[in-house]
Image (cartoon, rainbow, N blue to C red):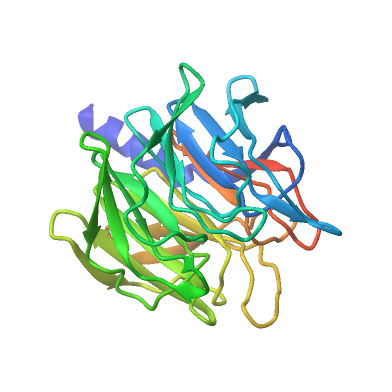
Amino acid sequence: MLLSVILVMAIQQLQAQLVWVEKSNFGGEARHRSVGFSIGNRGYMGMGHYNSIVDILFDDIWEYDPGTNTWTQKANFPGGKRLQLVAFTINGIAYVGTGRDPVFTEHKDFYAFNPITNTWTEIADFGGMARHGAVGFAINGKGYLGTGDAGGTYKKDFWEYDPVTDEWTAKANFAGPARIASVGFAIGDKGYIGTGNAFGSTNDFYEYDPVTNTWAAKADVPGPTRQEATGFSINGKGYIGTGDNYSSGDNYDDFWEYDPTLDVWDSVPEFPGIGRRYMTSFAIGNIGYCGLGTSGTNLRDLWELKLQ
C-alpha cells in the first residue's frame, strides 16, 4: 500500500506543470523600477517611476490579496518618492530602503513595515554607501543586501542586517563583478544573485552561504545575457526571467527554473504578457507573482506562476 501511494504521488508530481494565470491589474498607476515583497499571505508592490515629459516617481504601497484577487492601498513609504529600492521580509515585518529620489539623490535609510498596524518605523541606516539598483533577500531571520550603483560606481559589497540588534554587518563581497539591476532571492538557507549590468549584461549566477560567509559560482542562467530581469523562489527552486540586453535593448519574455540540488536550469513556459524590463516580483507560498515593468510603455498587469 505504501509503495502504491508513493508511486501515485510521484506520477502526480511528474504530471504537474507550471502555468501562468493573469490576475487583477495593480491598483496604482503603471510604472517600473518598483519594489515588491510578501508578508504572510499578502503581496506588496509600490514606488518606482514612469518616464514622461518629466520623470514621475511614487511613494505609494499596495497590498494584494490572492484570496479575493484585489488590491488595497496601504500607508505610503515614509522616505519619500523613490525608485529601485531593496526589500526583504523577516518574521512578518518588511524592511525597505535605499533607492534614488526625484532629484537623483541616492539614499541609505531603511524602514520597517508592520502590515497589522499599517505603520512604518525608521530603523538603522544601511551600513554601506547610499545606492540604487541593489538586491536583497532574507535567510534565517537576517536580511542581506548587496551590489547596486552608488554615485555612478557599481558595487559588490554585501551586508547583513540583524533586526534584533538593529545593526548592519559587512560580509564577504559578492563574488562576481560589481553590478546593478541584478536578481536576488533565497532558496532555503542559501542566497543567490545573478544576471545584471556589469558594464554589459550578464548571465552569471552565484550562491551565498551565510554559515561560512562564502560565495560559490553556479551554473549560468541560460538564454541571452540580461539585465533588469526579475526573479523569485517557490517550491524549493529559483526563477529568473524577462529583462533586456545591455546593448540592443531587446525586451525578453523567457523564464528559467533553477534547481539548487542539481545546479541545473530548465526552461519553463514563457511569460505570456508583453516582454519587458524592470518587472517586479514576490512569492506567496508556492506561487510566484510578477507584474509592472516597461516595454517602452509602462505596464500594470499582474500574473501568477504556479503548479497545476
Residue lying furthest left: 212
Residue at x-position 39% and y-position 30%: 93
Q: Position of residue 303 (x, y in %)?
A: 65, 42
Classify residue 301 as left or right of residue 235: right
Looking at the image, residue 76 lies above or below residue 277: above
Residue at x-position 37% and y-position 47%: 125
The quadrant holding residue 265 is bottom left
Residue lying furthest right: 53
**174 or 286, which is in the foreground?**
174
- Residue 170 appearing in the image: yes
Looking at the image, residue 215 lies above or below residue 21: below
Q: Quadrant of the C terminus?
A: top right
Q: Position of residue 306 (x, y in %)?
A: 53, 40
Q: Quadrant of the N terminus?
A: top left
Residue at x-position 32% and y-position 29%: 91
- Residue 18 appearing in the image: no
Residue at x-position 49% and y-position 77%: 202
Looking at the image, residue 218 lies above or below residue 45: below
Q: Position of residue 155 (x, y in %)?
A: 40, 71
Classify residue 147 as left or right of residue 30: left
Residue lying furthest top: 117
Q: Position of residue 71 (x, y in %)?
A: 66, 26
**164 or 252, which is in the foreground?**
164
Total residue callouts:
0
